[in-house]
Image: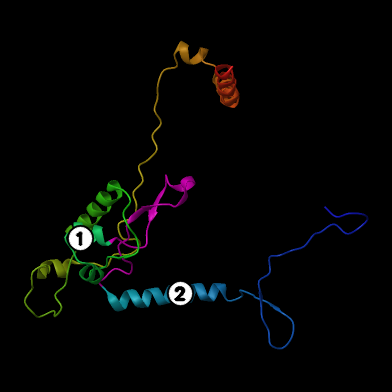
Amino acid sequence: MVKHNNVIPNVHFHKKHIGSSRGPLKAKLALDQASKKKSRRLARAARAAAIAPRPLRSLKPIVRCPTQKYSAKTRLGRGFTLQEIKAAGMTPKYARTVGISVDHRRTNRSAESLNANVERLKAYKANLVVFPRKRLSVAKNGDSTADECKAATQLTGTVMPIVKAPKEIEMMDVTADMKDFKAYTTMRVARKETRVDGYRIAAENAKKKD
């Protein structure tokens, strides 16, 4: 807060400034936002048509969000670890050629995440349609048949998105014990016990010394 009879601060720091060689700073504008959105959409459509029937996006792993606050949530990560790729029976070089993202920096910290992503890779591999390198050549080991190649269609959107289980409401009868239970009082008593716990331990230690 300002002192004395001065102007109350009411500054606005929402403008982005860029350097200018011809004088003072200029405000950075985004007047081309709508046109850029359209150009990005057209570029995605052109790339999808050029690489068809390959999907536009690659397969991503399911990872935990960082920090203890968000670690209960899951999201799509940057790429699969080398250990996950090896456990799924593939090599990193081959995985990149069939639309699987590989992140050599990431490591597995739990067996649960490792097994979950390995099963994700196996499920993707089971539905994978691999075209021969030359359309008229004989199919090699791992390539799909001619009928599967003809029936293949281009996948749009996220490859194997995270499927979240719907939240279900559990119905139950209200008992007499539930009605008699005082939730607010129980919480306040537990909070008070926690606050005085250290004082009680110190008092007991003082009595033992005496």
Mark 1 sits on what residue? 86
142 displayed left or right of 187:
left
Q: Residue at x 68, y 69 (%)?
A: 15
Closer to the observer: label 1 or label 2? 1
Residue 29 pos. (x, y %): 64, 75
Mark 2 sits on what residue? 40
Q: Amino acid at mark 2?
A: Arg
Q: Is residue 50 visible?
A: yes
Image color mode:
rainbow
Residue 54 pos. (x, y %): 26, 71
Asked if the magenta segment contains residue 48, the reply would be no
Judged from this view, the residue extending furthest toward the bottom is: 22
> On the rendered image, what quadrant is the C terminus found in?
top right
Above-or-below relation of 109 to 199: below
Judged from this view, the residue extending furthest toward the right is: 5
Asked if the magenta segment contains residue 60, the reply would be yes
Mark 1 vs mark 2, CA separation in Å: 36 Å
Q: Please give the range of residues in magenta.
A: 53-81
The quarter of the displayed image where residue 172 is located: top left
3 displayed left or right of 115:
right
Q: Amino acid at mark 1?
A: Lys
Most foreground residue, 6 or 33:
6
SS for callout 2: helix
Residue 192 pos. (x, y %): 60, 23
Mark 1 / mark 2, whichever is N-terminal: 2
Q: Callout 1 environment at 10 Å: few (<14), some (14 to 19), or many (20+)?
A: few
Secondary structure mostly seen in magenta is loop
Above-or-below relation of 76 to 39: above
Q: Callout 2 environment at 10 Å: few (<14), some (14 to 19), or many (20+)?
A: few
